[in-house]
Amino acid sequence: MNEHPVEASAAAQPALTQWQRVASTFSSPSKTFDDIRRGNRSWWLPLILMAIAGYLFFAVIDQKIGIRQAVDNQIRMSPKAEERLAQLTPEQRENAETLSEKITEGVFYAAPVIGILEIAVISLVMLGTMNFVFGGKASFGGIFAVYYYAFLPKIIQALLGIIVIFAGMAPESFNLKNFAPTNLGAFLDPADTNKGLYALASSVDLITIWVLVLLSIGLATVAGVKRRSGYIAVFGWWAIVILISAAYAAAFG
């Protein structure tokens, strides 16, 4: 007699293709994460799709806004950064702005690789959280794959940024760190608003909340724990990071 009919039935289900997992992430995320739990952990398609969206966004910024303009905007939105640059000679300021421009371009070009490294580190943290704190049985590979599928809504955010630019946004108003009207911070003036408050307002972002919900469901699924544990783990860590970021912005922004 089979003592585990549910597990046996789940294991017998046919694997989804990566395209099916991508589609299900938006329509029925449980299907995607159940498939990952069964061992189908390929994540290269979400990586490619997000890379395409990111490079397309970068190309639009480069053509319509200009990377130097985007960097200058970030400096102007930070009084402390402007103050530091004001103390430099014109030549030193030009060199500093050129360096910032090159770094920004480099980050865009290397974004897929940087993303892999970031998600690997975060996956290790969440592996410990889900298994040792909540008694789960997740694997590193399962958590890593969950992150890539859960981050797919970020493609929508990039597309919204492109739409905003083509809608006629003035280049000098473009905010590289908050380019889509999906959070409260997008409706505040970053130059005049308290930096800590602005960081908190920008964190209340619809796309980010969507991603966090997907992560909560996915991590709970691959770890074999209650969804409540997934929500506590994901939103708990998110709250800690946001509070630290807001404190840093208030002190050094």
Image (spheres, helix red, strand yellow):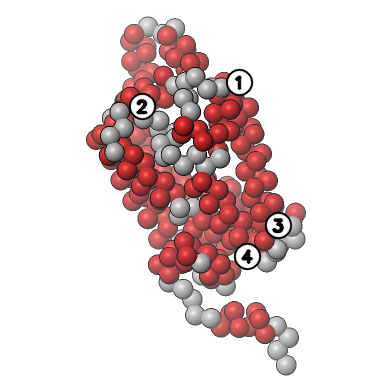
Residue topped by disc 4: 221
Residue topped by disc 3: 229
Query: Around disc 4, counting alpha carbons within 10 Å, would you say few (fewer than 14), some (14 to 19), or many (20 or more)?
Result: many
C-alpha gap between disc 1 and disc 4: 39 Å
At label 3, the amino acid type is Ser
Residue farthest to the left?
A: 63
C-alpha gap between disc 1 and disc 2: 24 Å
At label 4, the amino acid type is Thr
Q: Secondary structure at mark 1?
A: helix
Q: Is residue 185 visible?
A: yes
- Quarter placement of the C terminus: top right
Query: Which marked residue is nearer to the observer: mark 3 or mark 2?
Result: 2
Query: Which marked residue is nearer to the observer: mark 1 or mark 2?
Result: 2
Q: Secondary structure at mark 4?
A: helix
Query: Around disc 2, counting alpha carbons within 10 Å, would you say few (fewer than 14), some (14 to 19), or many (20 or more)?
Result: some
At label 1, the amino acid type is Ala
Residue topped by disc 2: 173
Residue topped by disc 1: 251
Cβ–Cβ below 8 Å for labels 3 and 2?
A: no
